[in-house]
Amino acid sequence: MAEITAAAVKELRERTGAGMMDCKKALGETQGDMESAIDWLRTKGLAAAAKKAGRTAAEGLVGVAVAGNRGSIVEVNSETDFVSRNEQFQEFVRTVAELALAGPGTVEGLLAATWPSGGTVEEKLTANIATIGENQSLRRSAVLQVPDGVVVSYVHNAAAPGLGKIGVLVALASPGDKGALTALGKQLAMHIAAANPQALTGDALDPSVIERERSIASEKASGSGKPPEIVAKMVEGAIAKFRKENALLSQLFVIDNKTKVEDVIKAEAKRLGADIELTTFVRFQLGEGIEKKASDFAAEVAAVSGVGSSAKVGAGQDA
């Protein structure tokens, strides 16, 4: 067997964009012949998948799965919304969410998990990229569990059962009636999907976010012309309001818009005669934080048809 050098692996990676281990395997299968290795990667769909890897994948689906007191949530991205309606893609997201239930809740662990028909999740994802023809990625995952209680899921704007654009998991720890807890959890999950709280409590909000808000509030208050001591109170008042509006337990429940979420939970605990603790929640919104490349179809058409640059600029402007 020909010796496979690191330099050869590096060259094959650069020429195809395929993964290091795939390149090493390709060279091994072809006795170190570079061109044959490229063809080998292409026949396996690996080179084609690698070429697509640089394209922005900000569409796709969020998937959820629940089994008793344990729930999982994943986000799998694609390049276009069209792929989210593809049955093969939907089945992949659904299966990945179910596999996550038994895993550690990390993307790395999930990618290494065994696919039901053989191979790994990562290998199945690579195969999907080749057959569907778009870049795809398993972006994030999370698993919630409570010793006694329920984990409840909710999907907003569902494309199929358990699949949609916004997914939420809510963990309620309680010895109370599981049916009643599930009903409460569903309402809380719907609230989280709509209100997008940033943390469970005000004290749990990201310190960097609080500092940014403090800076904004200080700048606004400084321009009021008020004395320094009044400005300081204005800033603290603004921060207190921000904490209240962005922490789940202190938000007003979207169903009646007048009762705090923590009071809704207390009222249900009293009705059931059992303590209820909302221990944690997870909210995934598809593509949040991903910088999407602007797609200007009108400008592309104008460029092809030879329309002047002023028309192209106008087509790209916001209304």
Image (cartoon, rainbow, N blue to C red):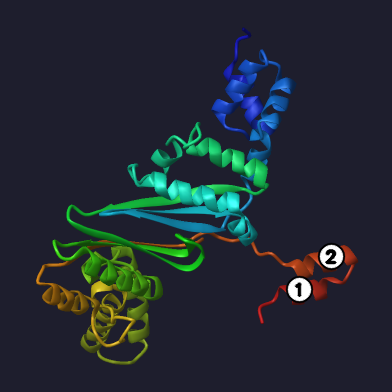
User: Which disc number belongs to residue 27?
Assistant: none
In the rendering, at what x and y percent does residue 240 appear? Answer: 24, 79
Q: Residue at x 49, y 63 (%)?
A: 164
Q: N-terminal of the two: label 2 or label 1?
A: 2
Specify the amino acid type for callout 1: Val
User: To which quarter of the image does residue 212 belong?
Assistant: bottom left
The N terminus: image quadrant = top right
Residue 135, position as x, y percentages in the image: 62, 48
Q: Residue at x 60, y 43 (%)?
A: 128
Residue 28 spot, x, y in % from top left? 61, 16
Does dot 2 land on a helix, a strand or a loop? helix
Q: Is residue 4 above or below residue 225?
A: above
Tell me, yes or no, if residue 177 can be seen here.
yes
**Residue denoted by label 2:** 303
The answer to which of 270 and 111 lies nearer the viewer is 270
The residue labelled by disc 1 is 313
Q: Residue furthest right?
A: 306
